[in-house]
Image (cartoon, rainbow, N blue to C red):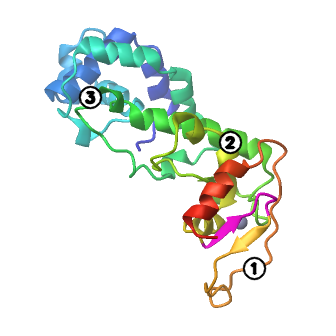
Amino acid sequence: MAKLDNRRINFVLNLPIEVKAKVLYEYLVKGTSNRECEKKIKGLNEEDGWQAWSVIHFYGFDKEHKKKYKYTQKFITEKLNELNETDIADLYLNKDASIIDEDDSEVVMNETDGNDVFRTVKKRVGQNKLRKILLKNYNGCALCNIKDKNLLITSHIIGWNDENTTKEDRVNPQNAILLCKLHDAMFENGIISLKDDFTVLYKDGYEFDDQSIDKNLNFSKPSKDSPAPKFLKEHRKRYRF
Ligand SMILES: [Zn+2]
């Protein structure tokens, strides 16, 4: 995910929706280069392509999306109107968020499904909001003393990709735990799980000692939105605890 600075973000925020829709239409549908977009589109000035490029990046698109879609400009305008631009800007400006580094690989772009067009940016906005909530609720990693935000991650109890996961579950703080990268990886891979009372469960046969991994973990409850039993149950079931 490209990083955008203040100047570029403000530029995009101040641009009329129709101009942004036109840029996306030209780039995503027709395959017009960003420089050509600037020449062609009223409302943009020729400036080495950065104006058009800022718009393209702002909505989470990149070279790989050029000429990949078959939508009308009207459809794109409608989609843009559904997005909250302030939330998107916050993605780039919020220094607490390392969403930019979180895994996007599970986001599948599918040109035949109109709802997928802005899925990446919607997902990031959702993740960003959820992360902010967790950083407020938890005092660092729920399982150790790590408080460095760069090492903390939103760990989903039931993953984004799970076929049973609803839209609401994905952004539900009770379906997430703030964990450090190590404990996230352990939880994500089913090396540990949690009982409904948050007692930590350890995978049978895993060589915790060999990896110098502490087996005396205590779960620190968040100030609110504790993990919900229905999600924890699902996690235990999946990893056979
Ligand atoms: Zn930890």
Give the quarter of the figure containing the N terminus: top left
Residue at mark 2 to residue at mark 1: CA–CA distance: 26 Å
| Residue 192 in magenta stretch | yes
Specify the amino acid type for callout 1: Lys
The disc, 2 or 1, on the residue closer to the chain's N-terminal end is 2
Crowding near pointer 2: few (<14 within 10 Å), some, many (20+)? many
Q: Nearer the viewer, mark 3 or mark 1?
A: 1
Viewer-closest of 77 and 12: 77
Viewer-closest of 234 and 214: 234
Viewer-closest of 33 and 232: 232
Q: Which residue is mark 3?
A: 49
Residue 87 picture location, percent across and down: 56, 27
Q: Residue at x 55, y 35 (%)?
A: 126
Residue at mark 2 to residue at mark 3: CA–CA distance: 40 Å
Residue at mark 3 to residue at mark 1: CA–CA distance: 54 Å
Tell me the quarter of the picture where residue 63 sits. Answer: top left
Q: Residue at x 41, y 13 (%)?
A: 15
The disc, 3 or 1, on the residue closer to the chain's N-terminal end is 3
Residue 69 picture location, percent across and down: 21, 30
Kindly report the secondary structure that dominates the magenta region of the rendered protein.
Answer: loop
Secondary structure at badge 2 equals helix
Residue 101 appearing in the image: yes
Q: Which residue is mark 2?
A: 173
Give the quarter of the figure containing the C terminus: bottom right
> Which range of residues does the magenta coloring cover?
191-198
Tell me the quarter of the picture where residue 52 sits. Answer: top left
Tell me the quarter of the picture where residue 74 sits. Answer: top left
The disc, 2 or 3, on the residue closer to the chain's N-terminal end is 3
- State yes or no: discs 3 and 1 in contact (Cβ < 8 Å): no
Extreme residue toward the bottom, this view: 210
Q: Is residue 119 left or right of residue 86?
A: left
Q: Which residue is mark 1?
A: 215
